[in-house]
Image (cartoon, helix red, strand yellow):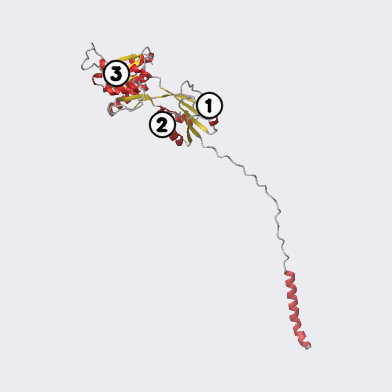
Amino acid sequence: MKKESYKQLFPLILIIVLLLAGCGSAAAEPTAIPTLASTETAIPEPTLTPTPAIPLALLIVPADMDQEISDVYQTLVYNLAQSAGMRFQVRNTLTMADLEPSLRVVIALPPDPGLMELAAAAPQAQFLSVNIPDMVAGGNLSVLANTNRPDIAAFISGYIAAMITEDYRTGLLIPKDDQLGQITLAAFHNGFDYYCGTCTAFIYPSWCATAPCYPQHVEIPAEEDPVAYNAYSDFLVLQRQVETMYIAPQFATPELLTYLSSSGVLVISDLSPQQKLGNWVATIQPDVIHAIETAWPQLISGAGGVNITSPLILVDVSPEHLPPGKEQQAQDILAQLQAGYILTGVNP
């Protein structure tokens, strides 16, 4: 190559060398990537929180209770428990082992499972004794008992008997030499008179010298053989022409009630018949169901230790012998008696 050619290439070579040197000096040094310090965070061990048990309501009924009556109580307490968000169980007995922490309400019918001791051992629960004898209310034990006003039952019986009986031919069987029998007799008379005033029979029987001839009554000794009850009733039916009769509950045997039914005599009592009878007018008995419903709000709120009385109601009512209009009239009088607006005239 000629010398002149080298001279021409030299500037070009110089430019290339300078460009390469510039690129080398401008190259950025690599940036270090930060690294996180390795730290371990302790994860706490999971703790199990127990789910609160659903509150429990127990109904204690005897194994030999009439199934129809048992079903009524079971349905009642089941519905009450459901409305309060509680579990419900029915049992025939109750022991200390059954007193679980979630237990809140116990309703027990006779016989007594030992309620006073069980209530003391389960202060978280409210106990209700239903017609169990010798119970004392206190603490978390409430006592529901039948009304102690036999005069009210007798008064309304006399009222109904006078209202439905032709010529007011009414009578009653009561215990002899017994204070309760005398209370029943006096209150029945007062209920009879409350309906009809100084009513008299339209046709006086031959044995009746002066009015009023009715009500008639017979007193039965406590030691009398039940077989003889029919004979006592014959005095009223055959000799005194009684058409409607009040039977004290201790004398309301199936045999006597069947006998009176066959005789066509209408019957009112405090005790429901074991079988349906054509002569039955009505039963006056405590409304235990209503009393439990009334007590329930107190039980679930934890308020206990009180005495509760069952109001009286008419059940087993025959629309044939006590038509709806007269039944309502009797119900109204019964309500006024229990409210104290009408007095029986007897100190029970």
- Mark 2, Cα crowd under 10 Å, few <14 / some 14-19 / many 20+, is few
Percent across and percent down for residue 200 are 24, 16
Disc 3, SS: helix
**First in residue order: circle 3 vs circle 1:** 1
Q: Is residue 336 left or right of residue 74?
A: left
Measure how far apart labels 3 and 1 are at the Cα level.
47 Å
The circle on residue 67 is: 2
- Look at the image and tell me whether residue 166 can be seen: yes
The kind of residue tagged 2 is Gln
Mark in the foreground, 2 or 3: 2
The kind of residue tagged 1 is Leu
Measure how far apart labels 2 and 3 are at the Cα level.
37 Å
Which residue in the structure is indicated by mark 1?
118
Residue, far bottom: 2
In the figure, 341 relative to 6: above or below?
A: above
Tell me whether the residue at label 2 lies in contact with that at label 3, contact meaning CB atoms closer than 8 angstroms.
no
- Look at the image and tell me whether residue 345 can be seen: no
